[in-house]
Every structure is written in structure tokens, then in C-alpha cells.
Amino acid sequence: MLSAAALDWPRIQQRGGLEMRLVLWLLCLLFAAVAGEKPPSAVAVVEGSEPIGAGNGEARVDDEPDREDPEVFLPTSQWQTLKPGQAVPAGSHVRLNLQTGQREVKLDEDSGASKYVRDGQRLVNTQSPSFTAQELKEALKMFKEGVEDSRTPEEEASLKAKFRPIDELKRDMAELDMLMETDAQIMRRLITQFNNSNSTVEEKVKALVDLEYLVHQVDNAQNLVPMGGMKLVIDALNGTDFRLQESAAFVLGSAVSSNPAVQVEAVDGGALQKLLMLLATSRPMNVKKKVLFAVASLLRHFPYAQSHFLKLGGMQVLADLFQTAGGDALRLRIVTVIYDLIIEKELISQTGLDYIPDSSYQERLRQYDQVSLLPALPEQGWCHLVPELLASQDHDWREKTLRAILAMMPYCQSDYQQNSVLLSSLSTLQKQYQELVLIEQDLGEEDGYFGEILTLLDTVALIVQ
Ligand SMILES: *[C@@H]1O[C@H](CO)[C@@H](O)[C@H](O)[C@H]1NC(C)=O
Ligand SMILES: *[C@@H]1O[C@H](CO)[C@@H](O)[C@H](O)[C@H]1NC(C)=O
Ligand SMILES: *[C@@H]1O[C@H](CO)[C@@H](O)[C@H](O)[C@H]1NC(C)=O
């Protein structure tokens, strides 16, 4: 993943920065050697230091004035006439006086105070970088060792400003490299990071979060199994850390969503038992939410998992959770899981009516036949539990609850009829929604949302009263 690979960037950048600085210095030296028509150039070697290249015949970068020079000219802010043979420091303005035919020199306007000071026989540039051989050696050493040098923040900023385009180019190239890391490579890296006993819990959670992002892709989710990631994730469900349980359930839920091949692997890998164990024991709410998400994804359109779930006592676990759940949000999710299971089976049986059944369809029908969810609903208390959610203030939750009540009708009708709380809340809600429908109609909405809820209320009331 991008974010993970981006961790390497500061290191690249730092190294790049040092390289850039060395290049800058070398450019300064080169520039000085080329641009200074004659010594003295912009670069001075100060007294007492060993001149660069001395003794080995390499390019002279020192600016020791020629001994033969009678005098080195020291420019001021005024034009001064240059005597024949006098050397002119680089950066001076030189003009030919057409009247006298003489050359005149003054300081560069921009430079303000004199850049040049006389240092014995030598002219030393006080503004351009000035290096002794020792300093340059130190700089090279620092570069080799990757040691950050001691520039002031201002110098740092001006260097950054100068080389920004190159930095950006490098960053683009680094990003390109990251993009070229395939999903499979990233997944392997994340799985290794997660599996490494030296990783902190934070690092492991981060690896799982990144993995969760990747397994939304069908291929990636399927690769999780041969890579060994599926087993690690399922193992983490009964690990010791809540944060890992939560993230592992999240990865699992996303990997199996609409992915039958992975659903099979997860169920055969024992995921359902561990998920149900997490739901049945005391866990923080955010763990339970992710676990419920994983359970729902595992069961959806997968009768094989649904039969397993029923055999493992999944409905009883959900009923217990419903009664201890800290909030209606989790309760509504539970009811939605049950509603989806009922409706899914309902729809598959109905499809058969106008559908030319093939063998796989027959097999699915046979599998769904083994899922006998409905008969167990009354004895597990669901006929009483689900209507409790009608007390919610949320229209959307009431709507979903009414749909679930209707879906459970074949087995819950007599329970509903004896449920005085349900009967009274039905009539209260009918009045409330009749008023809301009037307002809706005043606003010009004939088939509005409140009208839809009222229709559901009327239907339930008609059957149970
Ligand atoms: C964990 O750290 C130790 C010591 O730093 C090291 O020897 C070992 O190879 C590391 N293990 C893994 C799996 O990286
Ligand atoms: C996880 O680590 C264990 C031991 O460190 C190793 O045996 C196993 O193969 C690793 N699993 C994966 C999927 O990398
Ligand atoms: C998790 O469950 C497996 C078997 O399902 C067991 O081998 C393992 O020891 C358990 N881990 C923990 C930490 O309880």
C-alpha cells in the first residue's frame, strides 16, 4: 500500500538532500573556476590551509593572486579607473570609458558592502562560500557517512527552495516505484509484518488495516488463502489483544464479502466458531460490531455457512447478545442479519417459479432447505425481542424492524397477538405516521417515505389484531 511504502520516503529525501548539497558545492567550485576569467575567483582558500589539488597538478581552485601582479584592484561603489595589468575580482562591473579609452571598475550594485577584503597578499571573498581543503574533506566524509550537516534553518530553506523541482521529480519517481509494487507483493509484506513476532501491536493493526483495504478486490481476497494470511487472521480472532481481534474480524468480513471461494475457506478454517465465541463472551462494543459484520458477510448467500451457524447455536448467541447489547445500533444490526437470512431464502424459493432451474440452482435450493431458521425463532425468543426495537426514535430503524416483524410472521403471529406492548406501540405509531403522511402530502409527496412506513404499520396491525 502507498502509505506503508511512503515510510521510506524521508530517508530517500534526506539522502537526496545531502547529495544535492554536495552537487551544489561542486557546482560552486566549477562555476568559480570557469567564470573567474583570471584569479582571484569567487572561491578563496584562506591562510594556513592546504590548497586543493596542490602538489598533484589537478585543477586549481584556489585564488592565490599571481605573484607577478603589481596590485590587485579593490573595487568600491564608485567607478575607478583600472591601471593596465591590474586584476579585477569576479563580480565587479567593468566598463570602457569612451572619452578616456580607459577601463573603469566598480562594485556590483546588488552586493552592497564590499565582498572583498584584503588578506595580506590575497583578496578574500567574504560572501561566496569559502572552503578550506579540510572543510571539503569533512563535507565529503559527512556525505559518505550520511551525517546531517549543520546548516541553519534559513540556509536549509533556501536550498530547498532552489532544488524543489528536483525533489518533486524524485518524489514522483518514488511514487511510481510504489505503484509498481503489485498488490500481491504488498500483501506479502503486510502479512510478514503482521506475522513478525517483533512487530508491535500498533504495527500489526496497521498491517491489518492496510490488508483490509486490499482484500476488497476479489483476486486479492482469494490470494489471502494461499499466502497464509487467512489462517493468520483467523488465528488472531482468539488472540489476546482486543485491537487485533477487531482488525482481524474486519479483514475477514471484507475478504469474504461476495466472494464464495473465500467464504468456503473461512468456514472450513474454523472462522465461525471463533467469531461466535467473540460474540458470546465479554468484549468491547467495537470488537463486537466488527465481528458481527464478519458473521453477516460469511453467512450472506452462503447456505453452507448458514447451516453451520445454526448448528453452532449462532441464533442463541445472537439472542443473548441482543439482550445484553449496549445500544440499539448493535441490536438493529443483529435484526438485520436475521432479516437478510429470512428474505434471502424466501427470494431463492420464489426465483424458482419463473426460472429454468439448472443443476447448481437445484443444489442451492437443497442447501437452503437445510437451513431451518424460522422454526427456531419463537423458542429463542425472537418474536418478542425484535418488536422491542419499535421503541426506537429513528424512522429508518422502525422501518427495518417492521419489515423483520413481517418476515417472521409465519412463525411469530400468535406471539405477536399476545404481545400487548407491540399492539399498543403499533396503534401509537399508526396515529403518529398518519399525521406525518398528511404533512408529506401537503408538501406534494403522494408516495412518500412516511406513507411507506404507515403501509407497513397497517399491514402488521391488520394481521396481528
Ligand atoms: C526479532 O528481533 C531479534 C532481535 O532484534 C532478531 O534477532 C530476530 O531475527 C527478529 N525476528 C524477526 C522474525 O524478524
Ligand atoms: C508466520 O511465522 C511463523 C513462525 O515465525 C512461520 O512458521 C509461518 O510460516 C509464518 N506464516 C506466514 C504466513 O508467513
Ligand atoms: C486459538 O484457538 C486455537 C484452536 O482453535 C488454539 O489452538 C489456540 O491456542 C487459541 N489461541 C489462544 C491465544 O487462545
Image (cartoon, rainbow, N blue to C red):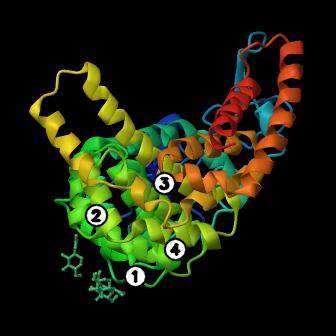
Q: Determine the residue positioned at 62% across, 42% down.
A: 400
Q: Which of marks 3 and 4 precedes in the sequence?
A: 3
Q: Locate residue 131, reporting x and y percent.
A: 56, 61
What separation in Å lies between label 4 and label 3 (alpha carbons)? 33 Å
- Circle 3 sits in a helix, a strand or a loop, which is it? helix
433, above or below 304, in the image = above
The reply to whether the C-beta atoms of the residues labelled 4 and 2 are less than 8 Å apart is no
The reply to whether the C-beta atoms of the residues labelled 2 and 3 are less than 8 Å apart is no
Q: Which numbered marker is on residue 308?
A: 2
Q: Quadrant of residue 458?
A: top right
Within 10 Å of disc 2 (Cα), the crowding (few <14, some 14-19, many 20+) is some
- The reply to whether the residue tagged 1 has its Cβ within 8 angstroms of ligand 3 is yes
The residue to which callout 1 is attached is: 239
- Camera sees residue 414: yes
Q: Which of the four quarters of the rendered structure image does ligand 1 lie in?
A: bottom left
Q: Locate residue 171, reporting x and y percent.
A: 46, 43
What separation in Å lies between label 2 and label 3 (alpha carbons)? 54 Å
What separation in Å lies between label 4 and label 2 (alpha carbons)? 27 Å
64, above or below 445, in the image = below
Q: Nearer the viewer, residue 18 or 387?
A: 387
Within 10 Å of disc 1 (Cα), the crowding (few <14, some 14-19, many 20+) is few
Tell me which amino acid carries mark 4.
Arg
The reply to whether the C-beta atoms of the residues labelled 4 and 3 are less than 8 Å apart is no
The residue to which callout 4 is attached is: 243
Q: Which of marks 3 and 2 precedes in the sequence?
A: 3
Q: Where does the C terminus fall, quadrant-wise?
A: top right
Q: Of tags 2 and 3, which is closer to the observer?
A: 2
